[in-house]
Amino acid sequence: MALLFDVVENKSCLYEKAVESPLHYGYRNKMEYTFGNEKKDGPLTLGLHRKKSFFDILPVTECNIVDGDFRRILRATMDYFGEQSIPFFHRKSHEGYLRHLLVRKAAHTGEILIDLVTTWNGRRPQERYGDKRDFPVDRCFVEDEEALLAGYVEVLQALPFDGTLCGILHTSNDSMADVIRDEGTEVLYGREYFFEELLSLRFRITPFSFFQTNSLGAEALYSVVREYVLAAGGASSVSAQAVGDTVRFGNVYDLYSGTGTIAQLLSPVAEHVTGVEIVEEAVAAARRNAEENGLSNCTFHAGDVLKVLDDLTELPDLIVLDPPRDGVQAKALSKILQYGVPHIVYVSCKPTSLARDLVPIQEAGYRVDRVRCVDMFPFTRHVETVVLLSKEK
């Protein structure tokens, strides 16, 4: 917050009390675990990278930022594959089978989705990679993969979950990079998505789609965003109309809209909401979720904000910015500011990027009116920050 004090020109700006995360423990709804060993030539383990180490994997079976279901899945997975001596993917030799375990659980519906990520184990569809593939893995590391995965499904189904197991997936990935990449996913049990509910809306979430990792914290964050949008629709906004107790805007731009969560939450106070997101999977999810929530006034466009803005014909009355950690690209920000909308609501997950972007925004004639942080990641220094900006008259 001290960083923002240095760049905010409006000294009467209201710095509101930070919103605490509703949960301090067990708040995460997503974990990406890595298979490996704790030390060279050690037994198989499953967990997170040790700090400042590329190879060592630290077991986290007692980690309390997730609930008991995560820990049950972690232990059962590590025990099952360890007992059968299944090799993990070595990040140096690029040999082995087990790579990652992705676990997601909804806070409100309790639905659990599990995705085991492995190498292709000799299953090399030439049409998928062609002749330009630099790193083929042509040898098998598991003799009977089908039986191995069937046994794993049985182990998971037998666990005493607090939530509800809705899907078990198997994703293949032969990328040399130590990241989870979808090069083909099959459903081993149930379905390939789960449902979460936020502020009376229902969202379908796939293994790789973006969604805030703290569901209850996300509700707190989006409540602040909605509050700031409603504040922007007061008497100071020439483009908003008060209809009863509801503030209605003409057209709202939700830029960097992800899976469209903010856009859908704002749909009741706008004639139309236009979302722009570069990740096509996220845009597809946003469209599907809007349809399932019965929202007909939300439109989502896939592409770079800088380019998509040139194709939009309906001018905005309000703009919401929720960019990735690096903030808004300079050319895109310049184009956004040319609209000269009365108000901008900026949602940031990195204060330094926000502070940088506030400089040209204020130079374009905007005043910072309100600032509020939301603690989305207890026990860390990371916060989400929401800023309400108004165009100077």
Image: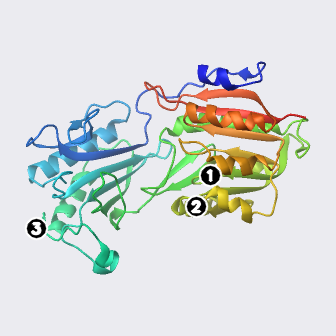
Please identify, in this view, whether the residue under mark 1 or under mark 3 is nearer the observer: 1
- Compare marks 2 and 3 and give the one earlier in the sequence: 3
Residue type marked 1: Ser
Q: Residue drawn at (37%, 62%), measured in percent from left and top?
A: 182
Percent from the top left, x then y, of residue 140? 13, 68
- Residue 257 is marked as 1
- Residue 143 is marked as 3
Work out how far the residue at label 1 is from the one at label 3, CA to CA, in angstroms: 44 Å
Residue type marked 2: Val
**Which element carries disc 1, helix, strand or loop?**
loop
- The answer, for residue 72, to whether it is visible in the render is yes
Percent from the top left, x then y, of residue 58? 22, 35
- Residue 303 is marked as none
Residue closest to the eye, 35 or 139: 139
Left or right: residue 187 versus residue 22 is left
Left or right: residue 104 versus residue 142 is right
Give residue 351's quadrant in the image: top right
Kindly identify which residue carries mark 2.
283
Give residue 341's quadrant in the image: top right
